[in-house]
Image (spheres, rainbow, N blue to C red):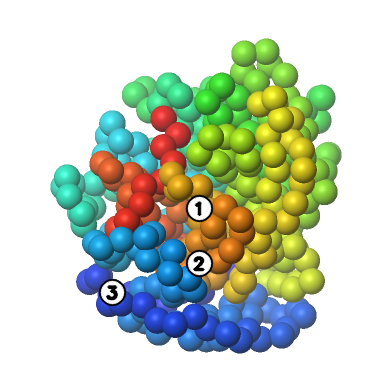
């Protein structure tokens, strides 16, 4: 979840070739988020016509020979994008409304078998949604949802049958204690559910004080066991596995402590862990620091490259943590791979959704 974003006018046509890498960023300890993010966007040197920035030649393989970038639709789109191949549709959640908080789960029907796709029909799947945020698919094709909860309704991880749209609880507490604000979720091949739980409900003032820390969890639906697999985070956010599930990557967006703040000395990085015996995490390490802004959504391609959001777009790293390039998508909070070949990046930027044709496919969960 992102508390503030920077937007700018975007053309619906494909953008031209990219540009050389920027080199300078402003040194600001704390300021209003909107001013800070505008300064970051300006310092990146990316004009409205720039579609990407190359830091290393390896990034050309990511772009591929058919790279294109188009606006798919102008709409309220913030978090949790999930492409459902069986429906050729994109599910996502909206920007939280001001005042009494509310978030809707939306479904966008796509038209056309080849890129660029057309936005055919937009519908509300669920509203209110108990402040839904990150989402993913499980191995049965159901939508797994991070419900952050409200002061009246507890947080939980839920599961929606996309055929009937009935919703059931997957897990709603750890050792009797209520979750904070589940943010992002991924389902492993063994059907276990891994998710992050920062305290954004508290800092955004739609929930009270948390009962537990900002942890990362593993839930086993087969046994009902829920365990803390990682702590030490400020604001654990995005979560994703490597293609072979031997490594898990988790973003920390601790630079945002309350609406309108940006603490540059707090975490805005990605941490990596080795997955031991399929259930424990070992060898915690810094994978990459993200700037400008902070990392939110995170995904991987089939070659093991790591993609994470930033203020100005989607940054791409090698499996060793080297930044090789960035795809311009200003204001992106979260994104997903999709399309028939799973080589289209859909980015949610609060006021629009971009569709970006790449030269590599993302990891297919199921």
Height in image: 236 above or below 276?
below
Residues under numbered marks 1 and 3 in contact, where contact means CB atoms less than 8 Å apart:
no
Residue 227 shows in this picture: yes
Tell me the distance, in whole angstroms, between the alpha carbons under discs 2 and 1.
10 Å
Quick one: label 2 or label 1, which is nearer the N terminus? 1
Quick one: label 1 or label 3, which is nearer the N terminus? 3
Q: At 67% across and 42% down in the image, what residue appears?
A: 196
Residues under numbered marks 2 and 1 in contact, where contact means CB atoms less than 8 Å apart:
yes
- Mark 1: few, some, or many residues within 10 Å (few <14, many ≥20)? many
Height in image: 70 above or below 130?
below
| Residue 216 image position (x, y, % from top left) | 72, 39
Q: At 45% across and 34% down in the image, what residue appears?
A: 365
Closest to the camera, between mark 1 and mark 3, is 1
Is 327 left, or right, of 113 in this rendering?
Answer: right
Is 123 left, or right, of 276 in this rendering?
Answer: left
Q: State the residue position of label 3.
A: 15
Disc sitting over residue 324 in the figure: 2
Q: State the residue position of label 1.
A: 305
State the SS at label 3.
Answer: loop
Quarter holding residue 74: bottom left
Q: Quadrant of the N terminus?
A: bottom right
Q: At 66% across and 26% down in the image, what residue appears?
A: 278
Residue 184 shows in this picture: no
Is 228 left, or right, of 189 in this rendering?
Answer: right
Tell me the distance, in whole angstroms, between the alpha carbons under discs 3 and 2.
20 Å
| Residue 198 image position (x, y, % from top left) | 72, 48
| Residue 211 image position (x, y, % from top left) | 83, 39
Q: Quadrant of the C terminus?
A: top left
State the SS at label 2.
Answer: strand
Disc sitting over residue 212 in the figure: none
């Amino acid at each position: 979840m992102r508390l503030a974003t920077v937007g700018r006018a975007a053309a619906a046509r494909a953008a031209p070739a990219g540009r050389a890498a920027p080199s300078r960023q402003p040194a600001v300890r704390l300021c209003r988020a909107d001013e800070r993010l505008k300064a970051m966007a300006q310092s990146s040197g990316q004009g409205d016509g720039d579609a990407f920035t190359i830091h290393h030649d390896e990034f050309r393989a990511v772009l591929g020979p058919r790279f294109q970038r188009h606006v798919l639709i102008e709409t309220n789109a913030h978090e949790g994008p999930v492409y459902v191949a069986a429906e050729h549709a994109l599910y996502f959640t909206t920007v939280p409304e001001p005042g009494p908080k509310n978030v809707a789960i939306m479904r966008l029907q796509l038209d056309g078998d080849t890129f660029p796709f057309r936005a055919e029909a937009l519908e509300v799947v669920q509203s209110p949604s108990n402040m839904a945020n990150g989402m993913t698919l499980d191995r049965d094709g159901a939508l797994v949802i991070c419900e952050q909860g409200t002061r009246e309704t507890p947080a939980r991880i839920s599961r929606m049958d996309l055929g009937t749209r009935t919703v059931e609880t997957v897990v709603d507490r750890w050792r009797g204690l209520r979750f904070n604000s589940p943010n992002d979720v991924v389902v492993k091949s063994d059907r276990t559910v891994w998710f992050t739980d920062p305290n954004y409900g508290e800092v955004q003032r739609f929930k009270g004080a948390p009962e537990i820390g900002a942890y990362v969890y593993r839930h086993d639906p087969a046994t009902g066991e829920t365990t803390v697999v990682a702590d030490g985070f400020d604001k654990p956010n995005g979560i994703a596995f490597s293609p072979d599930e031997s490594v898990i990557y988790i973003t920390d967006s601790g630079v945002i402590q309350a609406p309108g703040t940006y603490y540059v000395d707090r975490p805005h990085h990605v941490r990596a862990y080795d997955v031991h015996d399929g259930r424990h995490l070992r060898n915690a390490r810094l994978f990459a620091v993200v700037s400008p802004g902070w990392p939110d959504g995170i995904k991987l391609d089939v070659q093991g490259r790591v993609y994470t959001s930033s203020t100005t777009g989607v940054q791409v790293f090698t499996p060793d943590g080297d930044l090789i390039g960035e795809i311009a998508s200003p204001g992106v909070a979260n994104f997903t791979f999709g399309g028939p070949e799973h080589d289209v990046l859909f980015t949610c930027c609060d006021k629009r959704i971009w569709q970006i044709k790449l030269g590599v496919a993302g990891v297919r969960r199921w």
